[in-house]
Amino acid sequence: MSTGDVLAVVELEDGAPSPLTGELIALARTIAEGRGGSAIAVCLGSGLADEIGADLVASGADQVHLVSHDLFEPYQADAWLPDLAALSAEVVPAAILIPHTVVGADLAPRLAFRLGTSVATGCVEADMNGDDIRFTRPCYGGVAREQISFRSAPAVATIKAKSFDPLPRDESRDGQISVRDPVVTSVQVRTRVVERDTERVVGVRLENANVIVAGGRGIGGPDGFAEAKELAEVLDGAVGASRVACDLGWCPPGYQIGLSGKTVAPELYFALGISGAGQHMAGCGNAKTIVAINTDEDADIFASARFGVVGDCREILPHLVEEMRKVKG
C-alpha cells in the first residue's frame, strides 16, 4: 500500500536543478499535502554539490535524496533505474513526477514497467478525486484533453514545462537532506554513450523566455527567421517556430513549439505567419498575450490572440523591429 508521499525526479542543467524542477516540487507538495504525505526530491548525478540539496529544500521539498555516481552522467536508463526503483520500494510513494523532457520521456515508461505500474506522459494538469490522483494531458493533436487515473501505484507521470507555478523560494524552509549510497553497478549498465550531440543555446532559452517571436509557413523562409531573430533580440526574447517551419529546414528543430515540440508560457508571444493549428497551440496556449499576424483573416490563431493584424508578416516585421528599437531606445 502506498503512502501519501510524492517523489519528484530532478534533472540537472549545467550542474543545477532545471527550471522545471520548481514546478514538479510544487505539484508534489500539492498532491502530498492532500494525502498527508511529504514532497520528496531525488537527484542523481556525478559529484553532486552540497548546494543542490539546500536549493531543492528552498524550492519546497520536505526531503531530498542525493545519489552520486559517475554512471549517472550522461544519462543512461540502465544506470538510473536501479536506484530509482530502490528508493521507490523504500518510500512507497503515491506518485512519481518526472520532467517531460528527452530524458524523462525515456525514463518514465521504463521506470513504470520496472515498478509494475502505469505511466501518463505529457501531463499539464493534476487534481485529486478522493484518494485518486488524476492527470490531464492533451490528445488528438492538442484539440482535446483527456483525464487519466491509475488503478495501480505509484502513478508515474511526466510533467510538461510551464504547466504549474513553482513555489516562492524560501531559504529558511526546513527539510531533510540525505546522501545515499548508489546501488547501481557497472554490470547493470548494458549500453554505452558513444557520442552526444548537444544543441548550444545562445541567449535566452526558449522554455524560459518572457518574450517569444515564433514563425510559421507564412514567414516565408530563413530570411524571415533572421528578421524574427532581430525582433527577439530587441525584446530580450527567444525565437520559436511551428512544426512546418522546422520540417522545411528554415530553422533548427530545437525551435519547434507545440505538441511534438516544446511547451512555453511567455508573457508575450508573437505568432508570425502561424495558422494556429491545435498541435501548435498545445505548446503556446498558456502565453499571457498573443500577437498574431497572418494574411488569412479566418486563421484559427486569431481566436487565441489578444491582438491580431491581418497582413503579410514579411512586410510588417521590418517596421515592427524598427518601432521596437525606437521604444527600447
Image: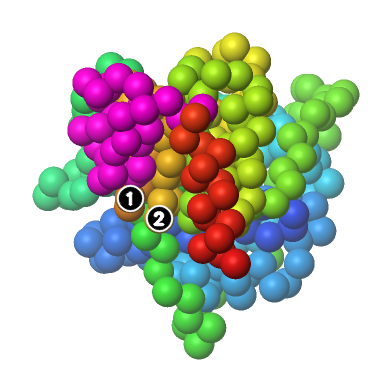
Q: Are marks 2 and 1 in contact (CB under 8 Å)?
A: yes
Q: Quadrant of residue 36?
A: bottom left
Residue 225, placed above or below residue 19 = above
Residue 243 visible within the image: no
Tell which residue pokes out farthest to the top in this image. 248
Identity of the amino acid at label 2?
A: Glu
Q: Nearer the viewer, residue 210 or 75?
A: 210
For this view, does 307 lie left or right of residue 245?
left
Graded by Cα atoms within 10 Å as few (under 14), some (14 to 19) or many (20 or more), the crowding at tag 2 reads some
Graded by Cα atoms within 10 Å as few (under 14), some (14 to 19) or many (20 or more), the crowding at tag 1 reads some
Identity of the amino acid at label 1?
A: Thr
Residue stretch in magenta: 290-314
Q: Quadrant of the C terminus?
A: bottom right
Badge 2 marks a residue whose secondary structure is: loop
Residue ID for mark 2: 267
- Percent across and percent down for residue 204 are 64, 52
Residue 260, placed above or below residue 322 = above
Residue ID for mark 1: 289
Tell which residue pokes out farthest to the bottom in this image. 172
For this view, does 317 lie left or right of residue 196?
left
- Percent across and percent down for residue 78 are 69, 30
- Percent across and percent down for residue 276 are 33, 26
For this view, does 308 lie left or right of residue 157?
left
State the scheme by which the image is colored. Answer: rainbow
Badge 1 marks a residue whose secondary structure is: strand
Residue at image coords 42%, 25%: 312
